[in-house]
């Protein structure tokens, strides 16, 4: 059964003529206010790079060195993978606050099984644990009708309790063969960045080239209309949370490869729950769901990573860094909200 979903006119094509006699014609040049949210975030990224380069140069440094570029890619890879999964959840009108604790749990599970001598077994176990957590999140939200914020926060606290009870500190050991994932490069591109790119491309393909993707947008846009159109909304939300948790599990594997062991606080210390939501919002995905995409999220992650790199080179204190990041996020949401309001007029 096909979904009766409205497909907007592609970019570069405009509907002209009277309301009763419209025809497809060549679009007029679009003003700044008509730029897509993805284009806006990449323009903001470019502006941040230029301004950051000037400020660092005035301070006597160089922002655009190979070392800095590689560092930005490595630091943004784990957050980028989590943010891709968070994008799927938010597009479906949900979110996931359990990803940070799941990352910690995944790193510990992986490191302990790898210490026993089985890398494939560790990867399989992390996938299974992550899928189970995502399934629980999705079922609690859809079947028990618990709001996603409360449901995923509750699951996060359960995971935290398990981790705190079982682990007092780092555990397990990751073999050197698996640590190549976190440290090796292909030319100037880290392997971790290639992993992030692969996850992002896979998510983009799911959203733009499959029925599942159309259903995610439909459920996030209006779940009642999607249900009346024949979409099994509960199934879509459950699958989306499973995919989101799998992305968190992959990020846990990546961080374990960097640390050489599992760490019970690596997810929370990195702030991957709120940071991933911030990156998704910066990328133009609406928190209400139904609008946005992976490409914008990639731009949002890179924007946060570049800001961190600039602050580190300028030796800005952590308090001021958080203030600036907060201002950037609030400003981005305000801009997107105003633009969305103008388009509805």
Image: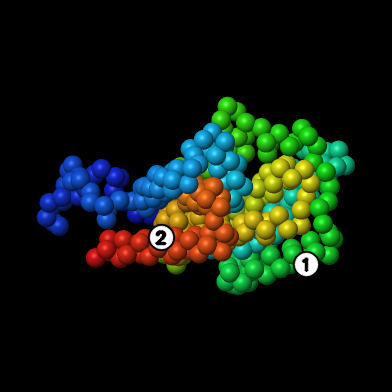
Q: Looking at the image, is 6 positioned above or below residue 182?
A: below
Residue 247: give x, y in percent of width and height: 62, 49
Q: Count all numbered tags in the image, as a single digit.
A: 2
Residue 54: give x, y in percent of width and height: 41, 45
Residue 329: give x, y in percent of width and height: 46, 61
Q: Quickly name the residue at label 1.
A: 161
Q: CA distance from mark 1 to mark 2?
A: 35 Å
Q: Check disc 2: other Cα within 10 Å, few if <14, some if 14-19, many if 20+.
A: many
Viewer can see residue 251: yes
Disc 1 to disc 2: CB gap under 8 Å: no
Q: Quadrant of the C terminus?
A: bottom left
Residue at 17 percent across and 43 percent down: it is 25
Q: Looking at the image, is 217 positioned above or below residue 222?
A: above
Residue at 82 percent across and 57 percent down: it is 169
Q: Regarding mark 1 in the picture, which secondary structure is present there? A: helix
Residue at 40 percent across and 48 percent down: it is 51
Res. 344 mark: none
Q: Earlier in the sequence, mark 1 or mark 2?
A: 1
Residue at 54 percent across and 56 percent down: it is 316
Q: Quickly name the residue at label 2.
A: 332
Residue 306: give x, y in percent of width and height: 50, 47
How is this picture coloured? rainbow
Q: Check disc 1: other Cα within 10 Å, few if <14, some if 14-19, many if 20+.
A: few
Q: Nearer the viewer, residue 84 or 264?
A: 264
Q: Nearer the viewer, residue 304 or 323?
A: 323
Q: Regarding mark 2 in the picture, which secondary structure is present there? A: helix
Q: In terms of image quadrants, where is residue 195?
A: top right
Seen as rendered, the residue at the extreme right is 116
Viewer can see residue 84: no
- Residue depth check, mark 1 versus mark 2: number of the one nearer the observer: 2
């Amino acid at each position: 059964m096909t979904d009766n979903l409205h497909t907007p006119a592609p970019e570069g094509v405009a509907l002209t003529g009277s309301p009763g006699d419209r025809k497809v014609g060549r679009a007029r040049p679009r003003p700044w206010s008509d730029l897509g949210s993805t284009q806006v975030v990449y323009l903001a990224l470019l502006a941040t790079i230029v301004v950051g380069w000037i400020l660092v140069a005035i301070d006597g440094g160089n922002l655009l060195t190979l070392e800095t570029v590689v560092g930005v890619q490595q630091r943004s890879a784990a957050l980028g993978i989590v943010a891709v999964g968070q994008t799927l959840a938010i597009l479906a009108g949900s979110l996931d606050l359990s990803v940070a604790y799941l990352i910690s749990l995944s790193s510990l599970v992986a490191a302990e099984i790898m210490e026993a001598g089985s890398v494939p077994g560790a990867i399989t176990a992390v996938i299974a644990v992550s899928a189970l957590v995502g399934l629980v999140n999705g079922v609690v939200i859809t079947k028990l009708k618990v709001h996603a914020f409360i449901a995923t926060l509750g699951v996060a606290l359960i995971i935290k309790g398990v981790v705190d009870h079982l682990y007092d500190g780092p555990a397990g050991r990751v073999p050197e063969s698996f640590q190549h994932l976190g440290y090796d490069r292909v030319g100037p591109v880290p392997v971790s960045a290639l992993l992030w790119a692969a996850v992002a491309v896979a998510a983009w393909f799911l959203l733009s080239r499959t029925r599942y993707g159309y259903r995610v947008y439909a459920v996030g846009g209006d779940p009642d209309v999607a249900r009346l159109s024949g979409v099994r909304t509960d199934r879509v939300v459950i699958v989306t949370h499973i995919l989101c948790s799998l992305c968190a599990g992959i990020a846990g594997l990546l961080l374990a490869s960097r640390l050489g062991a599992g760490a019970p606080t690596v997810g929370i210390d990195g702030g991957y729950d709120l940071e991933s939501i911030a990156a998704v919002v910066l990328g133009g995905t609406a928190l209400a769901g139904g609008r946005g995409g992976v490409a914008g999220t990639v731009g949002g992650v890179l924007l946060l990573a570049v800001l961190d790199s600039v602050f580190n080179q300028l030796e800005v204190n952590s308090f001021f860094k958080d203030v600036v990041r907060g201002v950037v996020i609030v400003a981005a949401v305000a801009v997107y909200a105003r633009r969305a309001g103008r388009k509805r007029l």
